[in-house]
Each structure stands twice: as structure tokens, then as C-alpha cells.
Image (cartoon, grey):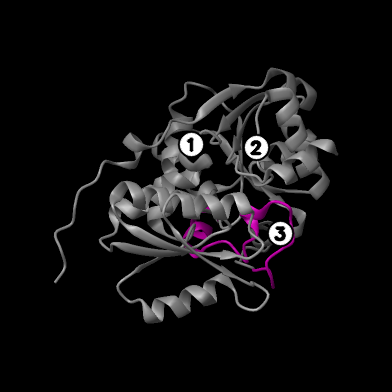
Amino acid sequence: MVSEFTQHPPVRDVVRPTTFVEATRLGRRLGVELTIASETFQHTGSFKFRAAYHLASQVRQRHIITASSGNFGQGLAFACQLLNKSCLVVMPNTSAKTKVDAVREFGGEVELIDVKRISRAARLSELAAVRGASYIASPYDDPLVIEGNATLGAELAASGKSFDFIIAPVGGGGLTSGIIRGLRVHGCPARVYAAEPELANDAARSLRSGQLLANATEPPTIADGVRTLSLGQHNWAILRDGLEGIIEVSEEQIKESVRLLFTLANLKVEPTGVLGVAALLAAPKVFYGQAVCCVASGGNVDPELFRNILAG
């Protein structure tokens, strides 16, 4: 028998509003009028809490299973804690220790896998077959995820700022598709670019070809949050028409952006979160002289890796 569905507070009433940082020094260095929309101060340290809470609050199941490099897992574990639910997070055994520890500290169960032997999706399929009462949640390819992330797009639209461009990281596409959805619902005309590592350029290749393409294996980029095989189907349906373009960035541009945000904007941002700023380094002529908002999607990075990047 299905229990009566409990109504929970909507995601917009639970999330922390994004933090707008007018990055004057960094913008001057990069030749743009720069604003950083920082989700590093969001619950669990990344935008992923938006999607995780919305999904967990909307599904009837009491137990949720997902796969994550760490940020969605943290967001889901904390959301389940708030909602008196439980979750299992499948994570690569190469995941940042700080992210694994955080999932567990928020009450989530962690299963570490070798993605060279079995993919995250394959392991989720196995778990779905034996845990039929659980909800199997994609961290990006789910309409509920897109709706949760659309709250960030709504905040950007309601900011009172006039952006020519908004740049955000893209992996599975949950963030960028949500931003586009939120912007358009609120009538914001800002053009949206995605930023992606050259080592993980399936989204860029897909946009160029007009069809959804995939990486053969999880790409070895330092930006662990975008080590996805491909965009999600639900996300692709929005991104193929909604994106202005995708800027591919090098590993060194990612590291340099971590350093620039720390030294010139006083922000600690993880490698995935700096992809928007890296896009300004990779394609300066596209954005020169424009009002640009870069979404710093998260700040969860192992201290040792962060120190090494800062040391150059």
C-alpha cells in the first residue's frame, strides 16, 4: 500500500540564495564586466543541493539510490536527512576523500566502485534490479533535477543585473539545462554558454554534430564533477537549442582559474566550479567588453589538491 504523500517546503524556501560577487579585479584582468554567482556557500557546498532536495522532496519513495562524484551525493544525503529519508550513493573509488567523508557525515551510505571495471550507470542498473522499492536518481538526467536547478536560473533572472552572457560548467547537463529553463520562464534574454574540459568534450562534440555523443570512458580531467560519459537525454533536449555554444578549456586553464578566483576574488572554488572563468581565458574575444556572469558551481575540493594547484 502506498503511504500518503507528505508535502514538504519547496526548494526555493530551503536553499540559500546564490551569492553574487562583483569581481572587479578579476574582470579587469580578463577584459569583461564580471560577476560571479557563487554556489560555494550553498548547503553542502554546491548547486547540487537544489536538485537533490527538489527530487527527494517530490518522490514518494523513502530510499533513494544515485551515482555521484560527490557533490550530488552530498546534496542528496543532506536532503534525505532533512526529509527523514535515506540514500545510497555509488561513487568512483577515485572520488575526493572530502566528498566521500561528507556524504557519510550527512548520513548517506557510500559504495565505492572501480569505474574501469563497471560504469556508474551499470551499477545503478544492478541495484535497481534488486532494490525495486528505491527511487533510482540520476544526478542530472531527470526532470526533477532540472526543475531544482531552475531555481538558480530564476535567481539570475531576478537579480536586477543585466548580463550579456552567463557561463556555467557542463557535465551531464543538469545545471545548464536548469539555468536555461529558469531564465526563460522569467523572460531573461541573457545568452548562455557552457564550459567543458577539452578532455571531456562530449557535450561540445554533440552540439557541433547535432546528435548526442558519448565518451568511451570517464575522462581523466581534474574537474571531477564533469567526468560524465554523456549529456542526459532530458538535458540534451534543452541544451541543443538553448545554448549559445560550448567553450572547451585546457587543464592548465582550469588550474589557472582556481588560482585567479582565489587571489583576485577571494573565493575557494573547486576545479569543476571554475570552468566558466576558464572559458574567459580560452575564448577572450567572444566575451571581451561584455557583462558576464560565471557560475561558480561548487567549492568542495580536497585541501591537498587545492594547495598543489595554488602552488602552481
Asked whether 209 or 99 is in front, the reply is 99
Quick check: 19 left or right of 12?
right
Q: CA distance from mark 3 to mark 1?
A: 26 Å
Q: Position of residue 177 (x, y in %)?
A: 50, 49
Q: Nearer the viewer, mark 3 or mark 1?
A: 1
Q: Amino acid at mark 2?
A: Val
Residue marked by disc 1:
42
Numbered range of the magenta stretch: 214-239
> What is the three-letter code of the residue carrying label 3?
Ala
Identify residue for label 3. Answer: 200
Distance between mark 2 and mark 3 Cα atoms: 19 Å
- Dividing the picture into quadrants, the one containing residue 297 is top right
In the displayed structure, does residue 34 sit left or right of residue 172?
right
Q: Quadrant of the C terminus?
A: top right
Q: Tag on residue 28?
A: none
What secondary structure is marked by label 1?
Answer: loop
